[in-house]
Each structure stands twice: as structure tokens, then as C-alpha cells.
């Protein structure tokens, strides 16, 4: 299947000849995978171009990694967003920065005063379908840690702080757009890129924009990394929430007049015991109380106590049901006069697999089979949550996660890296999915 723009046959012919001439060189790359075979002849230019893009993508990775961009580092986030915006403008996109309005900001306990802004770019094509590509530029690491994990390439690995999560995703998106432009693929109606700077803190500023853009597009591809041990796409991710329980009692002297107080620690203990069985394992709902605090000094009846629970869920509807249960149960007090409240912080909804996403996933598997690779389509969450879930909240369009490179070491003190031999097949996969979907070649994905 040829994805070239039918409006320019001479340009198509030149691009195809150039791609075929480059194909031989791509096989000589030290990063080429041993199991790779030649794609169909009509797709040879795309495959060759994806292979030849590797040096440029690695230079982009170097530039991105060398800018520290922790989720609370607004200076670093502004710097990296300028770089990304400049690249997208050079590619012909209509680019703007999006700062969340105060009314759109979902503030949580770890939300910084000014979360990172979003980079938004639009590319107009000649077709009808609208496709959204998303990735994030923030990392979990505070400023100063780059010196411990500088960018470097060793063998089949490119190392660097935040390279797997998710600077590879940003680079892959940028070079996917560059290849589409170079190859003349314009069969989409609109290609939109959104790179946000607050994913690692549950996207307080970007969640509404992600949901809106997901609603406005026909396909969403999210570029988190896949793992070095499993070449896959994900159709499902976990939802993450946090329950915060607070008890207000009354202080008094623990030795002289304990009966005059209201022991917040006793009430907290009572509440935790009656809230201990909220998990529903068969539905993937997990509620575990993990933190607690009470008291001021040893000889004072504690006037306040609090606890937090980690919540994981697989269904969007379970969050509201859980909140109702929490609010109902805390009405049963142990101590008269105690005040008890609970809040449920929606950190990230789950991404639930859809039939449309399964059909796009099946098409992706066929693309990989054409080059001799095996692609796993995972419709069970692995425990983490991503922005793909926000993009899926208000749409029935297919949403797929893990379009990025194969990576290792995210959120750890181990050296993060990506595999170089995943660059060509992953770029090729993205190009084919965009071109085939835009041209209506993905059966039943509407």
C-alpha cells in the first residue's frame, strides 16, 4: 500500500527512488534487528526513510536530555518547550503555547504554583480524518541529577536522564512529523501534536485540554515507551486516585484530664478499620491505606489525625462509586463530637480498551508482521497510568498507548536508556498507522 500523496506523481517517483536507494544503507546500520525482513515494495521508501532518520532523532534526544525539565522546574520546562515549538514551526505547523486557565487547573497536593505549559501544533492535510499525537516533556527528576545520567550512546543503547520517560516520545513525535512532511504524506485532514509538561504529576493543567482534543480527533496515538522486554502497544492503563482521610478531635492533658478530650487517633483507627475492605480484586479496584499521622506530643490527647490510601482502578465508573462508599461509611463515628472528612483525589482515570482500538491494534500487528517482527497488543493494564486515559475520556475514537521506543529505567536510580534498534521499526509503525488510518485502510476502526 502506497502512502504517497497522489497529487504529485513526479514527487512521489523521486521520493520512492530516493527511498529505495537508501534502503540498502539502512540494512548496514549496526542497530538493525536480526529478525527484520524487507517490507512490501510499496512501503520500501517509508522503511528506508525511517532508518535514515535515526542519526537526526538521536541528535534531538541529545538536545532534549540536556535540558533538565522536572515537573516543578518551570524554567527548564519553558526552555524545553521553546525547543519543541521551534522544531514544530520549522516543520510548518501552526504552533502555540497553552497555559491552563485557573478554572481548568485541577489542583492536587503536589501541584506546583505554575505547572508547565503545553506545546500545541496543527498541520493541515488534504484528507478528512483528524489524528492526535501526544507525549510529555516533564520528568520526575529534580534539577542537578543530569550530571549523574548524562546523554551518551553505547552499543545499541542511548542513555540519559528522562530519555525513556518521555523524551524519546517527544523525539519520536517530532521525527514522525518530519518524515511525513519529507515523504509528502498529507492524506490526513488534520494532524495535531500536543506535548505537555505536567504528566508526571497527574496532568493538573493539561487534563482538560487532552480530553477536549481527544474528543475532537478520530485517532489518538500516545508515545510513552514500550519496554525493552516486550515490543507492544497498550490499549489499557490503570486509573490512579488518592483518598485522604482527616479526623478533628479535641486536645486535652493526657494525664490530668483525658476525658475532656476527643482522641483523634482512636477515631482514625475506627475509620480505617471500617474502610479496610473497599478493594474489589475481581474488578481491578485496589484501595490500600498506606500513610497515617496523629498526635502532637506524648502527653496530649491528639486533636488531629489523618491517613492516605493509594487507589488503583480499571473502570472510570468505579471512582464515583468508591467516593460514595467512602462518604457513607465515615458517617459512623466511634467518638461523639469528632469530625471526620474524606476526599478522593482523581489523579488519573483508567484507559479502558475499546473495540475500535483493538482493530487499530490488529492493523499494527499486521504492519509489524510485514517486517518480520512480533507486536503484542496488551488490553490489560500494567499498573501505571498515562495521559492516554485523559484523551479517551470523552471520545469513542481509538486511543493507543506505547507508540514510543523500547526503553528501560524510568523513575529509578538506574541508568535510563532506549534501544537504538527500535527506532526504525517504531518510526515506520507510526508512519504506517497515520497514513493507513487517514486513508481509511484500517477496517472497522471508525
Image: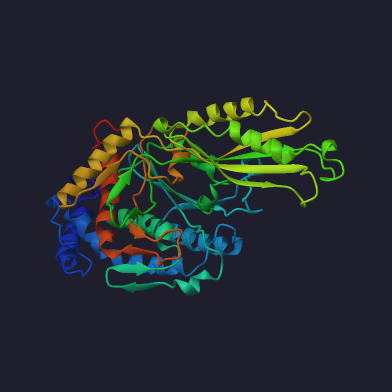
Vertical order, 322 against 59 (above or below): above
Examine the rendered structure and indicate whether residue 91 appears above or below residue 390: below
Quadrant position of the N terminus in the picture:
top left
Identify the residue at the far front of this view: 255
Percent from the top left, x then y, of residue 152?
37, 73
Instruction: Tell me where residue 22 appears, x and y as whole percent.
Output: 18, 65
Quadrant of residue 143 within the rendered picture:
bottom right
Q: Residue at x 15, y 52 (%)?
A: 372
Q: 126 above or below 201?
A: above
Frontmost residue, 160 versus 46 = 160
In terms of depth relative to the viewer, which is nearer, 342 or 40? 342
* Residue 23 appears in the figure: yes
Identify the residue at horizontal 33%, vertical 54% (top origin): 227
Q: Quadrant of the C terminus?
A: top left
In the image, farthest residue toward the right: 256
Q: Position of residue 270 (x, y in %)?
A: 65, 34
Place residue 301 in its image quadrant.
Answer: top right
Q: Is residue 27 left or right of residue 110?
A: left
Identify the residue at horizontal 42%, vertical 66% (top origin): 414
Q: Residue 320 in the image: state x and y as whole percent.
A: 55, 29
Would residue 185 be seen by someone viewing this image from the given angle? no
Q: Which is nearer the eye, 377 or 273?
A: 273
Answer left or right for 113 relative to 409: right
Q: How many marks?
A: 0
**Left or right relative to 304: residue 197:** left
Amino acid at each position: 500500500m502506497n502512502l504517497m500523496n497522489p497529487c504529485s506523481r513526479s514527487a512521489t517517483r523521486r521520493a520512492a527512488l530516493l527511498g529505495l536507494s537508501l534502503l540498502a544503507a539502512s540494512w548496514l546500520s549496526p542497530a538493525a534487528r536480526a529478525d527484520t525482513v524487507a517490507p512490501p515494495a510499496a512501503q520500501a521508501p517509508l522503511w528506508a526513510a525511517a532508518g535514515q532518520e535515526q542519526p537526526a532523532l538521536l541528535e534531538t534526544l541529545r538536545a532534549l536530555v540536556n535540558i533538565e525539565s522536572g515537573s516543578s522546574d518551570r524554567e527548564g520546562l519553558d526552555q524545553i518547550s521553546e525547543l519543541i515549538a521551534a522544531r514544530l514551526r520549522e516543520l510548518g505547523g501552526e504552533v502555540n503555547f497553552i497555559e491552563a486557565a485557573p478554572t481548568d487547573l485541577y489542583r492536587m497536593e503536589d501541584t506546583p504554583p505554575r505547572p508547565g505549559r503545553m506545546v500545541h501544533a496543527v498541520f493541515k492535510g488534504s484528507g478528512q480524518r483528524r489524528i492526535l499525537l501526544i507525549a510529555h516533556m516533564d520528568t520526575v527528576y529534580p534539577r542537578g541529577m543530569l550530571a549523574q545520567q548524562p546523554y551518551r550512546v553505547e552499543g545499541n543503547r542511548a542513555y540519559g536522564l528522562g530519555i525513556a520517560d518521555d523524551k524519546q516520545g517527544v523525539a519520536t513525535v517530532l521525527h514522525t512529523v518530519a518524515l511525513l512532511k519529507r515523504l509528502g504524506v498529507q492524506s490526513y485532514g488534520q494532524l495535531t501534536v500536543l506535548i505537555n509538561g505536567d504528566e508526571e504529576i497527574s496532568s493538573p493543567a493539561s487534563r482538560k485540554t487532552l480530553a477536549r482534543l481527544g474528543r475532537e480527533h478520530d485517532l489518538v496515538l500516545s508515545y510513552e515507551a514500550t519496554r525493552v522486554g516486550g515490543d507492544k502497544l497498550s490499549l489499557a492503563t490503570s486509573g490512579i486516585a488518592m483518598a485522604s482521610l482527616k479526623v478533628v478531635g479535641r486536645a486535652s492533658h493526657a494525664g490530668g484530664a483525658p476525658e475532656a478530650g476527643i482522641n483523634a487517633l482512636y477515631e482514625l483507627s475506627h475509620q480505617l478499620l471500617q474502610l479496610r475492605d473497599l478493594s474489589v480484586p475481581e474488578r481491578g479496584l485496589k484501595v490500600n491505606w498506606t500513610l497515617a499521622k496523629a498526635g502532637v506530643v506524648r502527653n496530649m490527647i491528639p486533636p488531629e489525625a489523618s491517613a492516605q490510601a493509594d487507589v488503583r482502578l480499571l473502570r472510570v465508573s468505579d471512582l464515583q462509586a468508591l467516593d460514595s462508599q467512602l462518604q457513607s461509611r465515615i458517617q459512623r463515628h466511634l467518638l461523639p463530637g469528632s469530625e471526620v472528612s474524606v476526599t478522593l483525589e482523581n489523579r488519573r482515570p483508567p484507559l479502558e480498551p475499546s473495540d475500535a482500538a483493538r482493530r487499530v491494534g490488529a492493523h499494527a500487528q499486521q504492519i509489524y508482521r510485514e517486517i518480520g517482527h512480533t507486536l503484542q497488543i496488551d488490553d490489560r493494564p500494567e499498573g501505571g497510568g498515562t495521559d492516554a486515559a485523559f484523551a479517551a475520556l470523552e471520545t469513542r475514537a481509538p486511543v493507543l498507548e506505547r507508540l514510543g521506543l523500547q526503553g528501560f529505567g524510568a523513575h529509578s536510580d538506574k541508568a535510563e536508556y532506549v534501544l537504538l534498534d527500535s527506532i526504525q521499526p517504531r518510526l515506520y509503525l507510526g508512519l504506517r498507522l497515520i497514513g493507513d488510518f487517514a486513508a481509511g485502510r484500517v477496517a472497522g476502526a471508525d
